[in-house]
Image: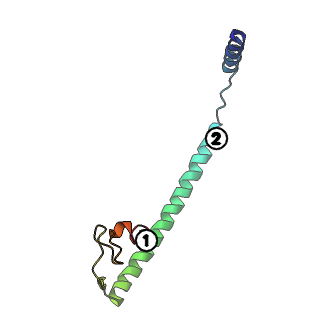
Amino acid sequence: FQDMLDRIDTHTTRALFNLEVVVKDEQEEIERIERLERQRARRQAAGMAFTGAMSTAGVAGEDARKHTPFVRDQPKVKPNEACFCGSGKKYKKCHGAGI
């Protein structure tokens, strides 16, 4: 058992001392950063064009129709009320369980 532990220590020490740190070429890193900056600028420009088109379309759409509030036909069922099916259970344990 001690021999096995000594071999593990030897292999670990050898691996750590023979470890080589690989550094990326600085030029590759600069090119990657520039590429990311160009992509971000393109996305930002496309987003600005889209929001500009949406804002002008929104102004025209507001004039065409007025917003009407939603009106319920029946009152909203609260979770702790008795279920409408007549089972005697609370709504949240009966028909509202899957919601």
- Residue 95 in the image, given as x and y percentages of width and height: 40, 72
46 vs 77, nearest the viewer:
77
62 vs 91, nearest the viewer:
91
Quadrant in the rendering for residue 70: bottom left
Label 1 secondary element: helix
State the residue lying farthest toward the top.
2
State the residue lying farthest toward the bottom.
64
Quadrant in the rendering for residue 19: top right
Q: Earlier in the sequence, mark 2 or mark 1?
A: 2
The quadrant of the image that shows the N terminus is: top right
- Residue 30 in the image, given as x and y percentages of width and height: 59, 43
47 vs 41, nearest the viewer:
47
Left-right relation of 33 to 19: left
Residue 27 tag number: 2
Left-right relation of 5 to 77: right
Counting other residues with Cα less than 10 Å from the Cα at mark 2, is it few (<14), some (14-19), or many (20 or more)? few
Give above or below for 29 relative to 6: below
The quadrant of the image that shows the C terminus is: bottom left
- Residue 40 in the image, given as x and y percentages of width and height: 52, 57
Pointer 1: what residue? 51
- Colour scheme of this structure image? rainbow
**Mark 2, mark 1: which one is toward the viewer?**
1
Q: Residue at x 57, y 49 (%)?
A: 34
Residue 80 tag number: none
Gap in Å between the C-alphas at discs 2 and 1?
A: 36 Å
Q: Amino acid at mark 2?
A: Gln
Q: Amino acid at mark 1?
A: Thr
